Image (cartoon, rainbow, N blue to C red):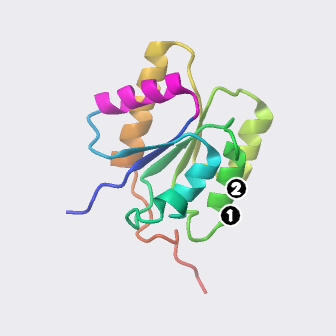
């Protein structure tokens, strides 16, 4: 049986971290949840650098990425991950409170898999996170190898 891939949560707001963890836990997902509190740490995790250099060689099932982050913002993380053939197959869901059209457009132009605006109401936020977790960790079928889709040449 294959090892479950972790879910990478990149979020700097402690309240949103707590709510997201509770929602994912209520979905009864067995995936490990890894929390990074800034964009630089997220890139270190994805690329197995620094404190994450000894982690298992396994991409996350999904990256739940906040837009506004310290050190390296979400759009920069997204650009790096989706711009690199070795990591572009990792699903990234932008999970943010921003409703700015430019943020949505830039995210999709950079290759985001989904853009979800965090609902303000507790129950709606909780339900949205549960659905995101179940879809990306259980239902989505990722590419069969780390490099994304095979090349034609």
Q: Quadrant of residue 87?
A: bottom right
- Tell me the number on the disc at residue 140: none
Residue 59 visible here: yes
Q: Position of residue 2 (x, y in %)?
A: 25, 63
Q: Count all numbered tags in the image, as a single digit.
A: 2
Q: Residue at x 43, y 22 (%)?
A: 126
Task: Say which quadrant the C terminus sits in.
Answer: bottom right
Q: Main secondary structure of the magenta part?
A: helix
Q: Position of residue 33 (x, y in %)?
A: 38, 43
Asked if the residue under mark 1 is in contact with the one under mark 2, i.e. CB atoms within 8 Å, the reply is yes
Find disc 2 in the rendering and name its residue.
Answer: 79
Residue 46 visible? The answer is no
Residue beneath the point at 69% across and 35% down: 68
**Image location (x, y in percent) of residue 29:** 29, 40
- Residue 98, by quadrant, is top right
153 shown above or below 133: below
Residue 136 sits inside the magenta stretch: no
Magenta span contains residue 16: yes
Label 2's element? helix
Q: Quadrant of the N terminus?
A: bottom left
Q: Residue furthest front?
A: 51
Decide: few, some or many residues near mark 2? Use Cα within 10 Å; few <14, some 14-19, many ≥20. some
The residue identified by callout 1 is 83
In percent of the image, x 40 and y 62: which residue is there?
A: 55
Q: CA distance from mark 2 to mark 1?
A: 6 Å
Residue 82, position as x, y percentages in the image: 64, 59
Which segment is the magenta one? 12-26
Quarter of the image for residue 120 reads top right
């Amino acid at each position: 049986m294959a090892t479950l891939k972790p879910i990478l949560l990149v979020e700097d707001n402690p309240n949103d971290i707590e709510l997201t963890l509770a929602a994912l836990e209520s979905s009864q997902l067995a995936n490990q949840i890894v929390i990074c509190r800034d964009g630089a740490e997220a890139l270190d995790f994805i690329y197995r650098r620094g404190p994450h250099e000894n982690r298992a060689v396994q991409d996350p099932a999904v990256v739940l990425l906040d837009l506004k982050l310290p050190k390296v913002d979400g759009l920069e993380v997204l650009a790096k991950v989706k711009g690199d053939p070795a990591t572009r197959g990792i699903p990234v869901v932008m999970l943010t409170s921003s409703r700015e059209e430019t943020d949505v457009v830039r995210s999709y132009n950079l290759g985001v898999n989904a853009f979800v605006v965090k609902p303000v109401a507790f129950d709606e936020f909780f339900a949205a996170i549960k659905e995101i977790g179940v879809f990306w960790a259980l239902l989505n079928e990722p590419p069969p190898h780390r490099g994304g889709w095979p090349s034609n040449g």
